[in-house]
Amino acid sequence: MKYGKVINEAGEALDYTYHSGAENNHYVLIIGHGLNENKDTHLITELSQKVSEEGMSVLRFSFSGSGNSQGQYGEYTISKGIEDLRAIISAVCEQGGRPVYLGRGTGATVGTLLSAEDSRIQFLISIAGLVETKKFCFNIQNTEFASEDVSLENKIDVLSENQEEDLKMIKSVYPQSQSIFVPWLLIHGLEDKLIPISDSASLASNCEDIRYLVELPNVDHSFTGEVISQVSELIIDWLGKRIQPS
């Protein structure tokens, strides 16, 4: 394993997969997933492969309680996920890596909150990122709202009590986002019924100089089909214009 065993604050080992890039590129794209997913979710594995083929190393990991990472899924919250990501970033930095973070859904929420306090994250990418966490709790309890255009892979049936309390406590990550000044790419499907496009749009508003919002027509929360290649190309192009191997 490239970074050895990575342990979070609770003493749980986090499962990860490392894709090696070019030797002269010290940036590492760290990818965190959303609820009901893990590091091996199809979208994440495809993105990892395509980005690493272009020369950037990628580390995709499962938050505690998901995939093969230790911990109980019902105990996982966004607040705990922040400590998971902090442990991953520390492992990367200890070996001279320069972290770039890509989060999907609630994984993007984790990245937003940590980036607001941790300057080690040098670039941010959010895919269907969740901003209004309290509102999200009510959305997924609306059967018609939550089930429309959402694949089984990404379907969230029930939140644990811990997860629901944490989401309601956070309420929104918009206030914290105002403290983030690194370049930020936001990608969101216009047909996303689980996390509305308005979440990403609110982050990009009045910050066009450092935040770039891409709205994808006819794309739902699952990002199924050929859209994965489109998303990969967007990310590779955006990073390529901003990052010089060093």
Image (cartoon, rainbow, N blue to C red):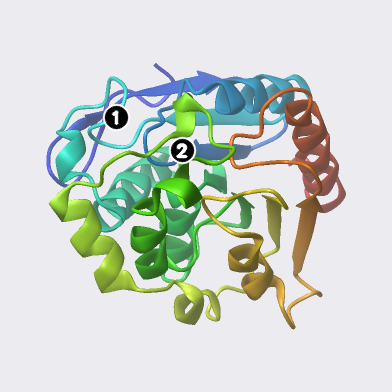
Q: Does residue 180 appear in this view?
A: yes
Q: Which of 98 and 150 is in front in this view?
A: 150
| Residue under the point 25% across and 36% down | 64
Q: In this rendering, is residue 168 above or below 179? A: above
Q: Quadrant of the N terminus?
A: top left
Q: In this view, does 61 lie to the left or right of 246?
A: left
Could you say whether the residue bearing mark 2 is in a helix, strand or loop? loop
Residue at point 62%, 49% (across, down): 192
Q: What residue type is labelled 1?
A: Ser
- Label 2, residues with CA under 10 Å away: few <14, some 14-19, many ≥20: many
Tell which circle, 1 or 2, labels the residue nearer the N-terminal end: 2
Mark 1–mark 2 distance (CA, rounded to whole Å): 10 Å
Residue 223 horizontal/vertical position (percent): 66, 34
- The amino acid sitting under disc 2 is His
Q: Observer-nearest residue: 242 or 200?
A: 200
Number of other residues with Cα within 10 Å of mark 1, as a class: few under 14, some 14 to 19, many 20 or more: many
Q: Position of residue 113 (x, y in %)?
A: 42, 65
- The vertical placement of 94 against 186, above or below, is above
Taking the spot 47% from the left edge, 33% from the top edge, the residue there is 154
**Residue, disc 1:** 66
Q: Residue 33 carries which label?
A: 2
When asked about the image quadrant of residue 71, the answer is: top left
Residue 209 on image: x %, y %: 81, 75
Residue 79, image x, y percentages: 27, 58
Q: Which residue lies furthest to the top in this view?
A: 1
Farthest front residue? 144
Question: Could you tell me how many numbered marks the image carries?
Answer: 2
Quadrant where the C terminus sits is top right
The image quarter in which residue 74 lies: top left
In the picture, measured across the screen, residue 163 lies left or right of residue 223, that is: left
| Residue at figure coordinates x 59%, y 59% from the top left | 196
| CB within 8 Å, label 1 to label 2 | yes
